[in-house]
């Protein structure tokens, strides 16, 4: 099998790994070295100047010793297999970089023989890039659950970000769908990475020349829809992971039925893409808006309302907190208003120091008034014709939302926004 055929197989097999995020790493170019890692992000991330940053997203191998039911690369699945040697992978990355196709590498792999051997192969490839080829660009690597601690440490000293994928939200689902994986095998390296990052920060405070350990932090991925867990279970787990392991991101991947299985949804089931999007919106609320999982959902209402975003849904269920007076409300209260994001709240606080704000002024600050208007007052007055009635507001929100569902077979992604909504989604403003 030639290298081009291997690349076609392994890049195709890598599309189910989610890593659309900023790297969080700032490392400028150095004389005698190739590439750089900028703080505004790599891996299909949007830079501060609007540019889209790309990387080579590939598996080391799609041959796997495990037989996870939901995975297209599982051992029992009949499909073409390929494996890149460390040298082949390093040369491919450099060739793509020199052609200006990429600025970094996202590397994952099926389990070759066992987790330790797989990690050794990944380390060998990345060391070739860093040492032989002097590659200084961004590298994100997936750690294999069950890998020896020494290998995790060695890998962490070579890469910018690491991920340990949980995949399924509960131990019961892991037992049913991924019998080769256990909760302990997944959480142990996550804890090790967290402790390693903390120790490294202390070492760097004393010795600036200390080698950096996973400077971009760690992330994980949860598959949505392959198992029966509710949104409440998923978002509660995410909240716990952020607190316990100080993760940079939890990624949510809508399960795409690619094969049949007695414990899996039917192959005719559509991927729950809108549900995935609602989870991402809730994730922003947890990380940037001061919400808790229990505020957003409960055991009585365990799933998000697909008609409106989680922040609007929360506001409709807590009308006693509204309306909020924009000229006097603290930042915490402004962040609870649908249509006012983190940037918008800061702009409001800055602008009202010099002038009294009205609705026209809020529009100039790029506040999304089509949502915010129902929950705010300016100078003690609401917009004329609006009512503080949940049913009235819900009808207004749903009539204003221009929801388009366009399925894109090539990328298997969905657009559900008009131009303004799409921009707000990219920036995380809710």
Image (spheres, rainbow, N blue to C red):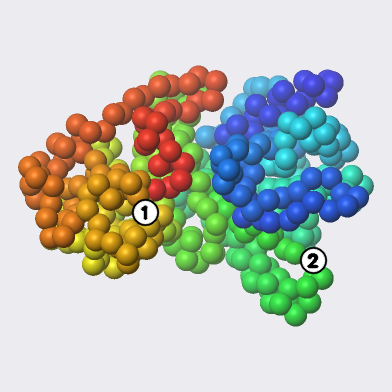
Above/below status of 31 relative to 191: above
- Is residue 28 shown above or below 42? below
Instruction: Note whether residue 199 is visible.
Output: yes
Instruction: Give the mark nearest the N terminus, 2 or 1.
Output: 2
Q: Tell me which residue sits at (41%, 35%) in the image.
A: 422
* Secondary structure at numbered mark 1: helix
Residue 20 percent location from the top left of the image:
56, 42
- Residue ID at (64%, 44%): 42
Indicate the position of residue 13 as horizontal and vertical percent values: 64, 30
Mark on residue 242? none
Does 333 sit left or right of 96 as displayed? left
Residue at mark 2 to residue at mark 1: CA–CA distance: 39 Å
Which of the pair 427/199 is nearer the observer?
Answer: 427
Q: Which residue is drawn at 12% across and 52% down?
A: 382
Horizontal placement of 216 versus 255: left or right?
Answer: right
Q: Viewer-proximal residue, 157 or 179?
A: 157
Question: Dividing the picture into quarters, in which one does residue 401 lie?
Answer: top left
Q: What element does badge 2 sit on?
A: loop
Residue drawn at the location 32% of the way across and 67% of the way down: 353
On the image, numbered disc 2 is attached to which residue? 211
Expressed as whole percent of the image width and height from the top left, the position of residue 429 reads: 39, 48
Q: Where is residue 418 in the image (x, y as percent from the top left)?
A: 36, 30
Q: Do the residues labelled 2 and 1 touch (CB within 8 Å)?
A: no
Of 306 and 6, which appears nearest the observer? 306
Residue on which disc 1 sits: 344
Which quadrant is the N terminus positioned in?
Answer: top right
Decide: is 67 above or below 22.
above
The 10 Å Cα crowd at callout 1, few under 14, some 14 to 19, many 20 or more, is: many
Tell which tag, 2 or 1, sits nearer the viewer. Answer: 1
Task: Say if residue 85 shows up in the picture.
Answer: no
Q: How crowded is mark 2: few (under 14 residues within 10 Å), some or many (20 or more)?
A: few
């Amino acid at each position: 099998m030639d290298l081009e055929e291997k690349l076609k197989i392994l890049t195709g097999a890598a599309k189910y790994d989610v890593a659309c995020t900023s790297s969080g790493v700032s490392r400028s170019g150095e004389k005698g070295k190739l590439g750089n890692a900028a703080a505004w992000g790599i891996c299909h991330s949007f830079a501060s100047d609007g540019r889209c940053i790309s990387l080579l997203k590939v598996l080391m191998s799609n041959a796997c010793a495990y037989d996870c039911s939901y995975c297209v690369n599982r051992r029992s699945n009949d499909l073409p297999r390929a494996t890149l040697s460390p040298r082949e992978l390093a040369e491919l990355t450099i060739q793509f970089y020199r052609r200006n196709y990429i600025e970094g590498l996202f590397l994952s792999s099926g389990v070759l023989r066992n987790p330790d051997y797989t990690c050794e192969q990944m380390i060998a490839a990345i060391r070739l890039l860093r040492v032989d080829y002097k590659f200084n660009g961004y590298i994100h690597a997936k750690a294999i659950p069950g890998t020896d601690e020494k290998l995790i440490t060695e890998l962490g000293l070579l890469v910018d970000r690491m991920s340990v994928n949980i995949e399924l939200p509960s131990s019961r689902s892991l037992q049913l769908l991924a019998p080769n994986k256990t909760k302990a095998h997944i959480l142990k390296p996550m804890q090790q990475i967290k402790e390693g990052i903390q120790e490294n920060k202390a070492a760097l405070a004393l010795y600036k020349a200390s080698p950096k350990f996973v400077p971009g932090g760690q992330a994980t991925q949860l598959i949505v829809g392959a198992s029966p867990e509710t949104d409440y279970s998923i978002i509660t787990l995410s909240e716990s992971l952020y607190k316990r392991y100080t993760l940079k991101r939890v990624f949510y991947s809508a399960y795409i039925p690619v094969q049949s299985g007695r414990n899996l949804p039917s192959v005719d089931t559509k991927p729950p893409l809108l549900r995935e999007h609602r989870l991402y919106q809730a994730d922003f609320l947890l990380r940037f808006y001061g919400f808790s999982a229990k505020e957003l959902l409960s055991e009585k209402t365990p799933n998000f309302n697909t008609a409106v975003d989680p922040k609007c849904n929360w506001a409709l269920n807590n009308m006693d907190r509204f309306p909020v007076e924009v000229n006097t409300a603290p930042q915490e209260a402004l962040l609870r208003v649908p249509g006012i994001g983190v940037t918008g709240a800061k702009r409001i606080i800055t602008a009202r120091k010099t002038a009294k704000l009205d609705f026209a002024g809020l529009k100039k600050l790029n506040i999304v008034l089509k949502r915010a208007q129902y929950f705010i007052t300016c100078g003690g007055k609401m917009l004329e014709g609006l009512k503080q009635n949940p049913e009235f507001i819900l009808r207004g929100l749903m009539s204003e939302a221009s929801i388009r569902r366009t399925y894109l077979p090539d990328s298997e992604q969905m657009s559900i926004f008009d131009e303004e909504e799409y921009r707000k989604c990219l920036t995380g403003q809710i």
